[in-house]
Amino acid sequence: MMTYASANSIQLPEMSDAALEAATAVTAVDEFGQRRDGYIAAERALTIYLDKLEIVTLMTLGTQPELLILGWLRNQRLVTTIDQVKAIQVDWETDSAAVTTYGGIEGLEQRLSRKTITTGCGQGTVFGGLMEDLERIELPRVQLSQARIYALLHALNEHNQVYRQAGAVHGCALCRDNHILRFVEDVGRHNAVDAIAGYMWLNGIGGSDKLFYTTGRLTSEMVIKVAQMGVPVLLSRSGITQMGLDLAQKVGVTLIARAKGHHFLVYNGAEQIRFDAAPK
């Protein structure tokens, strides 16, 4: 059991340390009938119990289950302050995680009755009135240079270890300036962003001066999550959806997609970009 101390006297939860390996060794047969040894991404079901009530089952690599659960609770607005959470205990023998709070969650069953199936990999789910909560979010308007975008894309090439080894995963990164503060891979991009949200919450890291990167498409769910984390810029090597764009315009998220090499498309917030490094 890991107990986290806090510099600002906030009581942080006790958490298990139940990380598992991200990839599993397998043997396959290629197009020539030859056996080949390699790796595939792990995929594990983890059922979350909140104060003994079964909430949801997440499909995950299992490399950072405690941070994933903490970030998921935060992004679902089921828990509003980290000191509400007493403990998170992950047990892979039962494929379950027990989350206990100090005072319970008011109106929990009613909030769970309202859910939306999203376009997240493996079908994500959001509970309660998250769409309505977006109206209360105010994000800063930050300037971003084209040169910085290219520097980040170059730095991100050094990550994606699980993808290079086994494939079948998405990656997300929390960035500041030209530095990658945290990079997480998981079977779904929504899991990876939740794990980073948990990391930010646990360490008291704000999002106002950060950029968020994902390998997956920019859907409404991704915009909602980064907006709740207070991050004003969302960057992806993939495409976007119409609802993702509509929400980004509503809350003020700078939305950059199809970012690969020296190419990118700014779908929202182009006035915040300084085009100082146009490709020749």
Image (cartoon, rainbow, N blue to C red):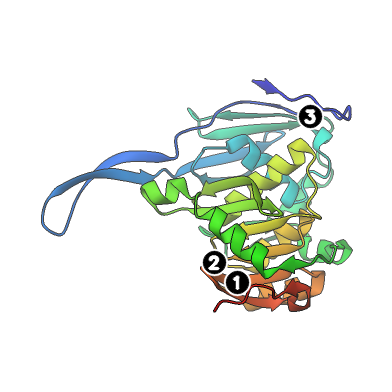
Q: From the image, tell me which residue sits under label 2.
A: 237
The Cα atoms of the two marked residues, 2 and 3, are separated by 35 Å
Question: Quick one: label 2 or label 3, which is nearer the N terminus?
Answer: 3
Q: Quadrant of the C terminus?
A: bottom right
Where does the image place residue 5, in percent across and percent down from the top left? 78, 24
Question: Quick one: label 1 or label 3, which is nearer the N terminus?
Answer: 3
Q: From the image, tell me which residue sits under label 1.
A: 257
The Cα atoms of the two marked residues, 1 and 3, are separated by 36 Å
User: Which mark lies nearer to you, 2 or 3?
Assistant: 2
Amino acid type, callout 3: Leu
Amino acid type, callout 1: Ala
Amino acid type, callout 2: Arg
- Classify 10 Å Cα crowding around label 2: few (below 14), some (14-19), many (20 and above): many
Q: From the image, tell me which residue sits under label 3.
A: 12
Where does the image place residue 35, in percent across and percent down from the top left? 15, 46
> Is residue 54 something one can see in this rendering?
no
In the rendered image, the vertical position of residue 271 relative to residue 126, given as above or below: below
| Mark 3 element type | loop
